[in-house]
């Protein structure tokens, strides 16, 4: 378990943006016989990168064992057991480097699905990921984060059905599974309601709490209650992200009516366009206001410092979910040292680290185009 005197950790999920070309999983199609062993070989280099850049918490992709639970591809079902030696070595290296690892299964993993077959498949997915963490020899701080799931037209029934799914999970899954409040369906109050009936550990998500808190719970009190769901000696972790604030660019096909208006020089009412539409254009770019559930590329340092000062005296690691991944973390460290040195001290951030971080960021930044796990909704569920 984490030494209580250890500074708080900052982490990021899955994709490495600070080193172009660094792969984090075997993405080959099934015809090419991908394997967990290949993913672990790629991730071994990722651990070295994390160590070199002093990045001490990392979320593994939930797809590092490709097709391991695909019902129609039984030839892949044994790859986790086949990779036992590699998993043990990988876990030992993570422990040596003092890097905290976790999973966040995809939005298609649903314990509250009305379809029992989907619940069964979800438990299989969770079992496979829990087995990987077990074979890595990681302690109870290595968790799998999930959401309650879909509403399916009945909020209370769907919330209760999650408990039924939890009760079907094998022990090694329940030992590692943690539940997060979400941003559009199940609030922090819902997560606490489930915890009272299951004792599942809870993950506090800062941005989600702002987006969905109809019960008007107090943030500090709620955070304390979430952290208290973790047993003594096991350091909790939370999620933090800032909302996107820039205009969204939406590509739209141009209708014959809009094309005729453009030819006539008439502006389209109610539409804010990125650029004038040419008469021959087939697509236009419309500008729309931000959606506050979306994650920003970087973490707002003033927002983060305000939150951490509100949480003074509480101990937890922080998974940053900025779209720039590790670069978001490396931007935040010098920002905290400059604007909130008291907060920087809680994370053990030094001036030397901050100087290196800023130098790296000056060499260029890339961001992730695809939605994060926590963004968007599942196509398999009914809101």
Image (cartoon, helix red, strand yellow):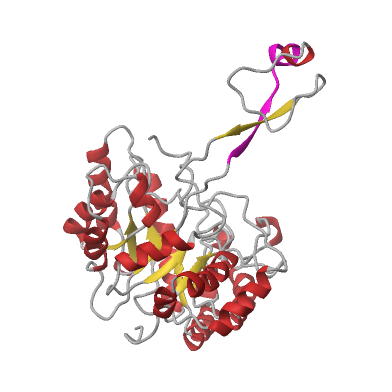
Q: Is residue 50 above or below residue 366?
A: below
Is residue 376 rendered to the left or right of residue 139? right
Please provide percent x and percent y for residue 379. 48, 39
- Residue lying furthest front: 339
Q: Is residue 45 above or below residue 363?
A: below
- Residue lying furthest left: 196
Q: Is residue 145 magenta?
A: no
Who's the residue at 42% across and 82% down the image? 137
Please provide percent x and percent y for residue 207. 40, 53
Please provide percent x and percent y for residue 355. 61, 79
Who's the residue at 41% across and 58% down the image? 124
Question: Based on the displayed image, in which of its 4 quarters is residue 276 positioned?
Answer: top right
Is residue 348 rendered to the left or right of residue 258? left
Please provide percent x and percent y for residue 49. 62, 78
Is residue 123 rendered to the left or right of residue 190? right
Residue 50 visible in this rendered orientation of the protein? no
Q: Is residue 249 magenta?
A: yes
Quick one: quadrant of the C terminus? top left
**Numbered range of the magenta stretch:** 247-260
Residue 3 visible in this rendered orientation of the protein? yes
Looking at the image, how many numbered discs can be counted on the residues? 0
Viewer-proximal residue among 142 and 238? 238
Who's the residue at 67% across and 29% down the image? 273
Viewer-proximal residue among 162 and 82? 162
Q: Is residue 141 above or below residue 383?
A: below
Q: Is residue 279 above or below residue 148?
A: above
Quick one: quadrant of the N terminus? bottom left
């Amino acid at each position: 378990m984490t030494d209580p005197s250890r500074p708080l950790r900052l982490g990021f999920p899955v994709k490495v943006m600070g080193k172009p070309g660094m792969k984090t999983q075997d993405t080959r199609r099934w015809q090419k016989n991908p394997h967990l062993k290949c993913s672990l070989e790629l991730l071994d280099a990722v651990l070295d990168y994390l160590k070199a850049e002093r990045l001490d918490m990392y979320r593994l992709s939930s797809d590092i064992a490709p097709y391991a639970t695909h019902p129609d591809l039984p030839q892949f079902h044994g790859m986790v057991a086949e990779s036992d030696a590699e998993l043990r070595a990988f876990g030992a290296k993570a422990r040596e480097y003092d890097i905290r690892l976790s999973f966040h299964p995809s939005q298609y993993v649903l314990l509250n699905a009305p379809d029992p077959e989907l619940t069964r498949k979800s438990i299989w997915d969770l079992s496979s990921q829990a087995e990987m963490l077990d074979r890595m020899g990681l302690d109870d701080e290595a968790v799998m984060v999930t959401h309650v799931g879909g509403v399916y037209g009945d909020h209370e029934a769907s919330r209760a059905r999650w408990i039924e799914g939890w009760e079907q999970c094998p022990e090694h899954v329940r030992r590692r599974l943690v539940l997060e409040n979400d941003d559009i369906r199940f609030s922090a109050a819902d997560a606490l309601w489930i915890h009272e009936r299951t004792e599942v550990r809870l993950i506090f998500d800062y941005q989600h709490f702002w987006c969905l808190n109809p019960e008007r719970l107090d943030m500090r009190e709620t955070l304390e209650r979430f952290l208290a769901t973790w047993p003594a000696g096991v350091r909790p972790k939370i999620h933090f992200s800032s909302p996107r604030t820039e205009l969204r660019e939406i590509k739209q096909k141009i209708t014959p009516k809009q094309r005729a208006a453009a030819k006539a020089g008439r502006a389209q009412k109610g539409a804010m366009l990125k650029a004038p539409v040419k008469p021959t254009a087939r697509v236009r770019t419309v500008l729309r206001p931000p959606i506050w559930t979306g994650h920003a590329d970087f973490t707002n340092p003033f927002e983060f410092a305000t939150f951490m000062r509100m949480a003074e005296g509480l101990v937890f690691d922080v998974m940053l979910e900025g779209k720039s991944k590790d670069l978001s973390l490396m931007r935040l460290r010098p920002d905290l040292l400059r604007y909130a040195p008291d907060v920087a001290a809680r994370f053990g951030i030094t001036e030397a680290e901050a100087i290196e971080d800023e130098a790296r960021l000056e060499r260029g930044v890339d961001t992730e185009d695809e939605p994060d796990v926590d963004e968007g909704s599942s196509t398999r569920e009914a809101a």
